[in-house]
Image (spheres, helix red, strand yellow):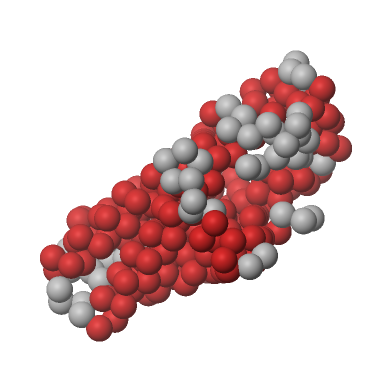
Amino acid sequence: MGETSLLIFSFCMQAAIGIMFFITISKQLYQDKTFKTASYAAAGLSLVGILASLLHLGRPMAFLNSLSHLGTSWLSNEALLCGFFAGIAVLYALVQHFKPGNASLDLLLRWGGSLVGLVAVFSMGKLYSSTTVPVWQGANTFIDFYTTTLAIGALLFIAASLKELQNVDKKIYGAIVLAAVIFQAVSAVPHALSLGKAGMAAQTSAAILSSMTMVIALKWLLVLGGAVLLFWPSKQKSGSGFKAGHVYLACALLVFGELIGRYVFYAAIVTTTIGIT
């Protein structure tokens, strides 16, 4: 598939934003925790995402060109916001490593990074939903991007912070992951059905999705299975749930499932005229 770099960019960037969001919320709840490893993960994933976007553009100077229509082009807005988020994520990780006791800078960077990141996810959704690709149009793209951000971000945050979360009540994390993937699944059904009632390009995309039934079924089996695997132990008493084996297996299932879903997202491309602009 020719959109591999876009897949890596969107997935890694959303995962990094999700991790930053859960660092921010968790440090408000547990102010004695640092979540340093999670901050490294957010910075690393955001850099991988930026590198993938540069590979997609073909040359570094093309990134500067993509910023030439700020305010009027969602591509320019996305490039700026994602680059800004990556910069904040890297700076936050450096602060955690070298200046972990700077509470005011910590607060500013993690809240700023979370807000910029969530707006960046919106810009991604707006970029794709504004194209002439019917399968990307509508609310489902926004739902898919935000639920992926929450589910993958929460799981990777948990995986990176198991020791620090050992003696706290973690049911809320499992509930968020499960709710996110259920909402993602429920919204995908009417969207897929609506494609068959739209124009020729949408119907062609519907046919492509129909031919990938087994792949899509595998995605939902992995995603829902991973979410349930995480949520079920979290219902136990605080401190007894979220064993490392459960978390790592749930993380592997959910990440692999969402990657399959993102592959399907790009594989179903059929345009009415022109694709992303």
Residue displayed at 41% across by 53% down = 81
Work out whether residue 79 can be spotted.
yes
Image position of 1 with respect to 274: above or below: below
| Residue found at the very far top of the displayed protein | 197
- Seen from the viewer's position, the closer of residues 14 and 277 is 277
- Seen from the viewer's position, the closer of residues 27 and 101 is 101
Q: Quadrant of the N terminus?
A: bottom right
- Seen from the viewer's position, the closer of residues 144 and 163 is 144
- Residue 100, horizontal then vertical, whole percent: 21, 77
Work out whether residue 155 can be spotted.
no
Q: Quadrant of residue 48?
A: bottom right
- Residue 83, horizontal then vertical, whole percent: 44, 60
Q: Quadrant of the C terminus?
A: top right
Q: Quadrant of residue 204?
A: top right
Q: Is residue 233 left or right of residue 22?
A: right
Image position of 69 with respect to 41: above or below: above
Residue displayed at 75% across by 39% down = 269
Residue displayed at 25% across by 83% down = 98
- Residue 214, horizontal then vertical, whole percent: 81, 43
- Residue 119, horizontal then vertical, whole percent: 39, 45
Q: Is residue 43 left or right of residue 237?
A: right
| Residue found at the very far bottom of the displayed protein | 98
- Seen from the viewer's position, the closer of residues 140 and 83 is 83
Total marks in image = 0
